[in-house]
Amino acid sequence: MSFLTILPLAVVMVAGTQFVAAVLLPSADRPRAAPLGYLAGVGAVVTAGVTVSWLVTRVLRGFADRAETDVGRLESTARRIDWAVLGLLVVLALVVYLRRHESGTPRWMSALRHAGPGRAARLGVVLVATSPTDDLTMAAVGASVARHDLAWWHLLPFIAVTLGLLALPLVALLLAGRRAMDTLPRIRTWSDRHAWVVSEVVIAFYALVTVLDLLT
């Protein structure tokens, strides 16, 4: 497995309320500072989440490897991790499907107009840490990277792509100015209606990659 195969799961991370917040913050009283604070909060949680999953998987695999010394048993440990990742992906797909109608802008987000960087950072932490889809995605990504004996730095592209997707509204504001403010609401509406479909396609792709690992 190449670490590049986990990058599409970044789409699952940002789909939904996380992206809605990223679209709303550039229209806040501090249109640059607030989005940057939000990205910092999200980045901290995503980095911690995938790192914890990576570490836990490595530790558990280390215990299993010490207990199982022959090659066949070592391979069975890797296969069990693959089955665990596949199980996480199945649960993730189910959660995304069940939450597909939870669209629209939550009422409390209207207060984001006056959010500063500190409040935006706290929002990023809460949105990611309390999202079942994000928690499951981070667990699957960290476990999959550790299962393939990849170093921690292989998680960095996934973190970067996640933050890059959430930074798109801010980049659009910086490049297009007021024209971006007319386009972003349409993007938000499209995301509300169709993001779950994109997420399911990405999850299915990564599940297929995991199944292929199990078959080899």
Image: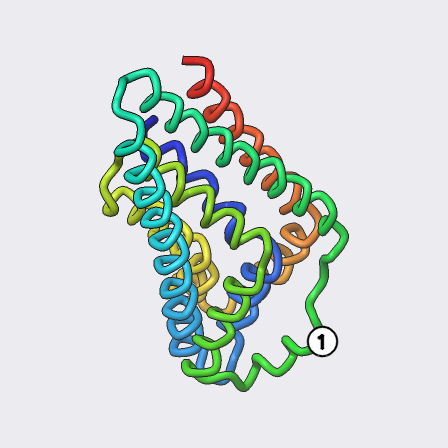
Whether residue 196 is situated above or below residue 23 in the rendered picture: above
Is residue 210 at all visible to an observer of this figure?
yes
Reading the image, the residue beneath label 1 is: 107
Q: Residue at x 54, y 35 (%)?
A: 202
Q: Is residue 31 left or right of residue 193?
A: left
Q: Secondary structure at mark 1?
A: helix
Q: To which quarter of the image does residue 121 belong?
A: bottom left
Q: Residue at x 71, y 43 (%)?
A: 97
Tag 1: residue type? Arg
Mark count: 1
Where does the C terminus fall, quadrant-wise? top left
Q: Where in the figure is residue 31, as x and y percent of width and height?
A: 45, 77
Q: To which quarter of the image does residue 5 belong?
A: top left
Q: Where in the figure is residue 118, as x and y percent of width and height?
A: 42, 83
Q: Where in the figure is residue 215, as x and y percent of width and height?
A: 46, 14
Where does the N terminus fall, quadrant-wise? top left
Q: Residue at x 43, y 33 (%)?
A: 81
